Image (tube, rainbow, N blue to C red):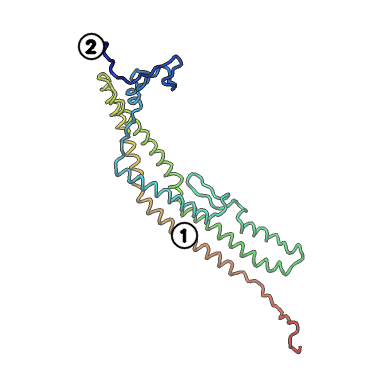
Amino acid sequence: APGGGMPEPFPTTPSKSFSSSNTADGKRRRRGISPGGLGGFGLKGQFRKATQVIERTPYPKALTAALDDYDQYRESTENMFGCLLNIIQSNAMYRGVTGTSLILKPPEGQEPHEALHTALMAKPMVLNKQEKLQADLDKSTAVVHKMAAEKATFYHAAESKMQNLSFFVYKFTVDFEEARGVMEKSRDSVDSAKMALSRAGKNAVSAAESALNLAAVEYKKAVDAVLSLLTSLPELKKIHYTEVEEVVTLLTEHNTNLIKCLAEVKMPEIVMEKSKAPNSNNPN
């Protein structure tokens, strides 16, 4: 410094001082953790490495497209199948399935027309000494019996004509989802094996490669199993279309037959007397 005095200090930014209360400029600081790192031990990089995302093995494009088509067809077919069941047998209590075989006919004596026929056969009007009304009911009883028989025939035919749709909903879709689950798990195994190989040391590379090859073989088997099921879908669609067409025709014929049965019931003619209007000019 000029004149031999003490040199002036370089201007500096005042440093932050930390008190025993672990504060820096009045702000609390967590003990043992230095700014810019986890505890000053440089663990950030290791943490990122530990949470590295496993890259998924992509499905073949043809498989992806086929899976999308299957999912859409399954949803629409199950919805249509449910609608047909509701029309054919509106009482859910009487709808059932054994294996893949539909049960639509109510238990013996519980079908409404059958139950009504049983009630009419008891000749309730005779008990009330209404012989004329009972005679009219006897004519209707035979018609109700025909309607009950038509219903039984209809249920049996519907159960038979919907067997392929029923198989698809209750069996094929279950088998497919099981095969799909196996494929997903085998793909996970391939992904894990790839990750293990990428992290393997020199002495472990050979074992990791063998594990990856085995996983790849199982994955291919699983993919082939799913593709095998998917290849049958076009033919199933044709069969299902034919069945739906037949069931709709069956519904039309059934309703026509019920109308024919009702046409056999001749209601007694009721002769209405002409009422005389008050204050009319009729001299009689």
Q: Which residue is mark 1?
A: 248
Judge depth for marks 2 and 1 and give the one in front. Answer: 2
Q: Residue at x 33, y 28 (%)?
A: 52
Residue 94 image position (x, y, % from top left): 57, 50
Residue 183 image position (x, y, % from top left): 36, 36
Q: Which one is in front, 3 or 31?
A: 3
Residue 217 image position (x, y, % from top left): 30, 32
Residue 104 image position (x, y, % from top left): 54, 52
Q: Quadrant of the C terminus?
A: bottom right
CB atoms of marks 2 and 1 within 8 Å: no
Reply above or below: 62 against 267.
above
- Neighbourhood count class around disc 1 (C-alpha, 10 Å): few under 14, some 14–19, many 20 upward: few
Identify residue type, mark 2: Gly
Indicate the secondary structure of the residue bearing disc 2: helix
Q: Which one is in front, 125 or 75?
A: 75
- Neighbourhood count class around disc 2 (C-alpha, 10 Å): few under 14, some 14–19, many 20 upward: few
Q: Which residue is mark 2?
A: 3
Indicate the secondary structure of the residue bearing disc 1: helix
Q: Which mark is residue 112?
A: none
Extreme residue in the top direction: 4
Could you say which quadrant of the image residue 181 lies in?
top left
Reply above or below: 130 against 240.
below
Q: Residue at x 49, y 63 (%)?
A: 252
Q: Which one is in front, 134 or 50?
A: 50
Reply above or below: 238 against 134.
above
